[in-house]
Amino acid sequence: MNNLAKVKLIPVFKPLIEREEIAAAVESLELGWLGMGSYVKQFEDHVAAVCKLNEASDRHVVAVSTGHAAIHLSLLMMGVGPGDEVITPSLNNAADFQAIRACGANPVFVDIKEDTLCIDSTKVEDLITEKTKCIIAMDYDIFICDHDALAEIANRHKIPVLHDAAHSFGSSYKDRPVGNQHSFTIFSFDAVKTVTCIDGGAIVIKGVENVPRLHAKRLIGMTQPATQMYKNSRAWTYDIEELGFRYHMANLHAAIGISQIKKIDDIRTSRQKTCQRYYDELSNLDWIDAPRTNFATVNPFLYYIRVLNGKRTELRKYMKTKGVDTGIHWQAGHSFTYLNDCRSGPLGVTDKITEEIVSLPLHSMMNSDDTARILAAIKSFQK
Ligand SMILES: Cc1ncc(COP(=O)(O)O)c(C=O)c1O
């Protein structure tokens, strides 16, 4: 038996599904209304509470089936269409690129900042043309974008920002919860996120007048009132005024999400602690860059390191022999066949760091023996 067969592989992601989630799932199944209903309304209210939305903020949560659906619908609500351009960091999730293409538009790739791996706001303006219909600001792992600078550019050019906060649900920017920075914010609650619905997403949209249209667009265009569906009931007559998609959230997913949100304080604290420990124990290694932020202000999705000595592949293979899995988030958008004809600015930082980044395992309530094993594996690598 080799070493790997003896030790259980520590995965990059590990869901926190406990008695509460299972009980909530069963309860929602026993309700007899499987589709969008009362749990979805409650889930939206819980998301709004985490974001501290109130009447004055005039921001509203609309739950959908995935983060990808949330991006697609947000872009459509902004009026993004065929031939338009959307500026996005090339270091972004494929869901963003595909949502842009699903609108018939093209991504335009911008570089990232080396210290945060978030969009470099100083490089955005050079890429704006009359075709630009949106700028995507994606918070990466432990970092939050420079949202004030992006809002300033967006206001000056009258282009909306889509805040992709798939990694930052429950984080803050300058003392305000994420969700309050722009007119569109999206969250993902997929299987690996800090808070999961197994699959799920949400849009925080500014302007109560925009909500009915978004409700219809998530329900294949049907103008049926959400208020009725939130009572586990439906209308039999409705209109269809425009294109829509089957993007609504089901009760089962919402029920699981609610039980997760109830634990968000513990989830956040435990992830902050693990990230702080990674930083404390790795920042003195000269062949690694271990990033640091004010961990107390974020709900960390992942912790990445940069391998500076060109031995990323060897390190990842070695860690696997020590029973530790690692990831890469992500390959650059401009490296994909489907997207290699998209316009871009200089992408020097993206090209460099996509050869260096390694995502370490990060779980909610992570076992401290696992963290010790991960750290020991890195430290014992013969570089
Ligand atoms: C930054 C970012 N945006 C969007 C998405 C898409 O979310 P979903 O998987 O819920 O469709 C992800 C998924 O990991 C993501 O990381």
Image: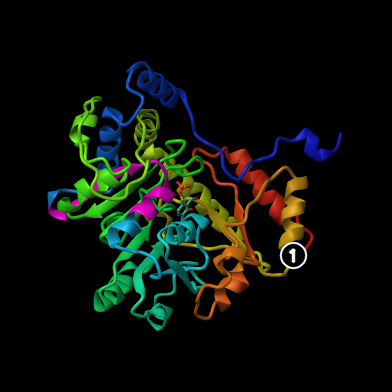
Residue type of the residue flagged with mark 1:
Lys
Q: Give the range drawn in magenta.
A: 56-73
Residue 114, percent from left and from top: 52, 73
Q: Does the magenta stretch include residue 44?
A: no
Picture coordinates of residue 318 (x, y %)?
77, 52
Identify whether 61 is placed above or below 138.
Answer: above
Mark 1, Cα crowd under 10 Å, few <14 / some 14-19 / many 20+, is few
Number of numbered discs overlaid on the protein picture = 1
In the foreground, 278 or 357: 357
Q: Which residue lies furthest to the left in this view?
A: 56
Looking at the image, which is closer to me, 301 or 208?
208
Q: Look at the numbered disc 1 and give the secondary structure of its residue.
A: loop
Q: Is residue 311 above or below residue 323?
A: below
- The question of residue 71 being in magenta is answered with yes
Residue at the spot 33% in from the left edge and 57% down from the top edge: 76
Q: Position of residue 156 (x, y in %)?
A: 25, 78
Residue at horizontal 57 percent and vertical 62 percent from the top: 290
Quadrant occupied by the N terminus:
top right
Seen at 29% across and 73% down, the residue is 154
Q: Name the residue under label 1.
A: 311
Residue at coordinates 78% horizontally, 33% vertically from top-left?
Answer: 6
Is residue 161 toward the left or the right of residue 107 in the image?
left
Q: In this view, does 248 lie to the left or right of 349?
A: left
Is residue 336 something one can see in this rendering? no
